[in-house]
Image: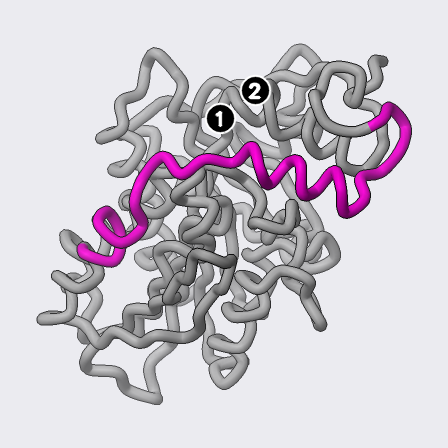
Amino acid sequence: MTSASSSYPIGTPGTPWGEAERAQWLSRQTRHRSYASEVVSAIERLSVRFDIAEYGQLDYPPDHYRLFAIRSRNWRDERPVILVTGGVHGYETSGVHGALQFLDQRAADYADRVNLLVVPCVSPWAYERIHRWNAHAIDPNRSFRENSPAGESAALLRLIAPLHGKFLVHIDLHETTDTDESEFRPALAARDGKEIEPGEIPDGFYLVDDSENPQPQFQQAIIDAVARITHIAPADANGQLIGSDMVAPGIIRYPLTQLGLCAGITGARYTTTTEVYPDSPRATPQQCNAAQVAAVCAAIDFALIPH
């Protein structure tokens, strides 16, 4: 086991970051792409077919980000609600663009059966900086709880609060990238003054089921659909993916609500977190987006069949 702080350029080994270290970390973050031109413009183009709502704003001076949700235009209270979220981790690109591609290409297939609520980019500051955390070095996907320290998480919780009890499906679109191992896990350990030992990034797509509400058939239906688009991650030598036992090919389980994860916020019967692997030599960005779309469609299709 090695000390993360010894290999990370910020902080003192064994000591959690204070305000000075967080400020130093923030000063190193650089904008690499535009939320306005790549995401907001795509949302605006969808406004001729969907209802667009601004559900909050994030203020990270000098930057300000409007948060958008897209809803079915023919919303009916008697229909089940399907929630699709992307960009909870802003650097996970296919989560954002897969959600937008689903709206553009496939959402009309479900228009007369469900209410769609899609939040394609929960974390726009991190989207622009290709980062996992927000500007306060907080991971939104460990912060979905009451009195959340992350503005991104708190805003999404406020958005869905009036719909509790109506959700049938929540699918949260993510990626696992090589930078999880090279940058984000070392940064996390340094921030918290802890130690890490090297891990292994799965080569392929996988899902995270809810250990408190396991739905193996639902997860399998998604795996089967995505396997036609891109490869499913095999287990490592320990029969695991990212340190968790693989309960079926390409499927692990976490206690979603306990960990403050986005996929645990709705109380829906069917929930999952997708994990695409964009750094694989066997996958293209187009395949990654298509895999997310296939996962969303398979999730809705399965949920609409009586079980």
Report crowding for label 2: few under 14, some 14 to 19, many 20 or more residues within 10 A (C-alpha).
some
Q: Residue furthest right?
A: 14
Q: Which residue is mark 2?
A: 201
User: In the rendered image of this protein, does residue 44 appear above or below residue 18?
Assistant: below
User: In the rendered image of this protein, does residue 27 appear above or below residue 143?
Assistant: above
- For the rendered model, the colour scheme is one colour
In 3D space, how far apart are the residues under numbered discs 2 and 1 (Cα atoms)? 7 Å
Under circle 1, the secondary element is loop
Residue at image point 47% right, 76% down:
159
State which region is magenta: 12-41
Q: Is residue 305 left or right of residue 189?
A: left
Task: Name the quadrant containing residue 83.
Answer: bottom left
Q: Position of residue 128 (x, y in %)?
A: 39, 43
Q: Earlier in the sequence, mark 2 or mark 1?
A: 1
Q: Residue furthest bottom?
A: 77
Q: Position of residue 25 (x, y in %)?
A: 64, 36
Task: Name the quadrant containing residue 24.
Answer: top right
**What amino acid is labelled 2 in the image?**
Ile
Q: Judge whether residue 298 is colored magenta.
A: no
Total labels drawn: 2
Q: Is residue 201 left or right of residue 245?
A: left
Q: Position of residue 3 (x, y in %)?
A: 83, 18
Q: Which residue is mark 1?
A: 177
